[in-house]
Image (cartoon, grey):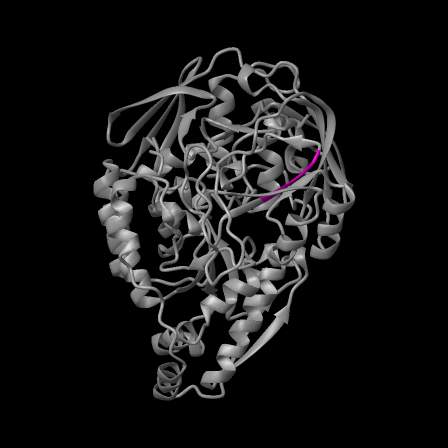
Amino acid sequence: MRMSRTIALLTCTAALAAGTAACSGATKPTAAPGGGPGYEVTPTSPPAKGTLDSFTWSLYAEPYTLDYALAYDYSPNTVLANVCEQLFRVTPDMRIEPGLAVSYKQPDPRTLVYTLRSGVRFHDGTTMTADDVVASLKRHMDPETGSPWGSVFKNVDTIEKSGPLEVTIRLGKEDVLLHELMAASPGTVESAAYLARAGKDYGTPKGGVNCTGPFALDSWDQGSGITLKKHGAYWDEKLSPKSRSVKFTFVEDPAARTNSFLSGTSDGGYMIPSNSFDKLRSSGKGSLVFGPNTAASNIAVLEFRGPLGNLKVRQALSMALDRKNIIKAAAGGVGVPAKAPAARGAWALAPEKTAALYDTLPEPAYDVEAAKKLVREAGVAGRTITLATSTLAPEISVVANAVQDAGRRIGLDVRLKSVAPEAYSNIFVDPDARAGLDLVITQGYDNTPDPLEFYQYLRTGDFGNYGKWSNAEFDVAFDRANAEPDPAKRADRTAELQKIAMRELPILPVYEAPYSVFLGKRITGAPTGIAQLYYPWAATIGAAQ
């Protein structure tokens, strides 16, 4: 869901308490909201001092696919970031640099021409050409693929080879986000021949993948682990892996995952269970590090035909949430209340606009009595609302319980439906998995920090518009913003979308927190922020001593 991008570094200010600014180097320690230990946000951990034979990395869930066209969540992208590459690359400090494309030009507002890097080899030794790029991008547009990224290409008329190392995209109307998302899953390049050969098995344990990244897929033992091996012919010398292999384990239970860090059976992992922060900090077994984030914890409305179709009910539920206590319980005190669905860190494209367009927003109100009144006015007292919860992460359970309590206080019957970790992820990719649910807790994130990317998911008919919310004013404002090439002017237009979203509340903002990573004592060098979803983070990890 989560987005020409040249992203300026954010200024390191006290706003880093939200963990959403992308800064160069370490930041000053900041006090956690509501007290508690201070923390700092930095885009990278200390550089590696040597090489490793192998290290083990813990995922909170097994990837449901390694097909780049279907990857739409943290676990598959965390693996794929090291295996497959895009036309452009998001760096740890949230800039965009050339990837498999060395440059692009835009001869007119509806034409994009990409010049490809020469001599890039896939893991099977074949050489990347324009044919591979055309085939890879077009897969998103094929209904049989079922790509959640398909709507990104909605304005594309043609994708054609215009030279041995040149690809031209022609648009039906201007679309700034299409180009920006060439730095994320939509811009991934796979071997056309391999795609044809693997067929429907592509991206599965049987079919595998064959990309250009610094690591190749070595094995996938379903239910047990994934192993990557170093790609000896990798084109980017500065990202030549410092480890010969990476072993991924799948540990769904948060307590067991924490214990794997403490015992050393896992050398590290991203998205650490917040209820283990204190234990890991004081363990002496490694370092808990916080990085830049574009994500906010939100509650998405999935069903507008019931009580939540009434704006007063959505307003009431938002007003009844005690966000500061939620942060203490769900985020280990590390975070701030979210002022809007798209987090502060999603405003980094035009950082000079962030203060005026985001920071000036009021914090969400907490007023239980006013919320009760709205429920009475809506005539829905006692009505049932169903919210999905899961053991996937302790934060989900904490927020779910808080929503249930908030509903009880204002006269709503919020019932929790427990969903298995793998099934919880399906809510975001399979409309059938949303049946019977009114609300779901999300980590809404941008792949790259242009807030317009987040708000595209509220357009009528977009794949990421989970509740099928529709607002004509919003759609017109989105098209206006998406046709504006100047980042500063586009930020102003995106603020209009933010205003509509906060007025209509198809998504209830809850809190923002920094990205987290744990590094055992023997390793270092990992990027610490959400850019790891598309940056080959494992290549920079090496020996700490």
Q: In the drawing, does residue 186 fall left or right of residue 242? A: left
The answer to whether any part of residue 209 appears in the image is yes
The answer to whether residue 208 is above or below residue 316 is above
Place of residue 508 in the rendered image (x, y in percent of width and height, measured from the top left): 42, 65
The answer to whether any part of residue 434 appears in the image is no
Place of residue 247 in the rendered image (x, y in percent of width and height, measured from the top left): 73, 34
The answer to whether residue 317 is above or below residue 516 is below
Magenta span includes 527: no
Residue sitting at 30 percent across and 56 percent down?
498
Residue sitting at 35 percent across and 41 percent down?
348
The answer to whether residue 276 is above or below residue 488 is below
Place of residue 158 in the rendered image (x, y in percent of width and height, measured from the top left): 37, 31
- Front position in the image: 283 or 212: 283
Q: Which of the 4 quarters of the picture holds residue 8? A: top left
What span is in magenta?
A: 517-521
Residue sitting at 52 percent across and 11 percent down?
119
Residue sitting at 34 percent across and 64 percent down?
363
Q: In the drawing, does residue 365 fall left or right of residue 36? A: left
- Front position in the image: 444 or 267: 267
Q: In the drawing, does residue 254 fall left or right of residue 73? A: right
Q: Which of the 4 quarters of the picture holds residue 341? A: bottom left
The residue lying furthest to the top in this view is 119
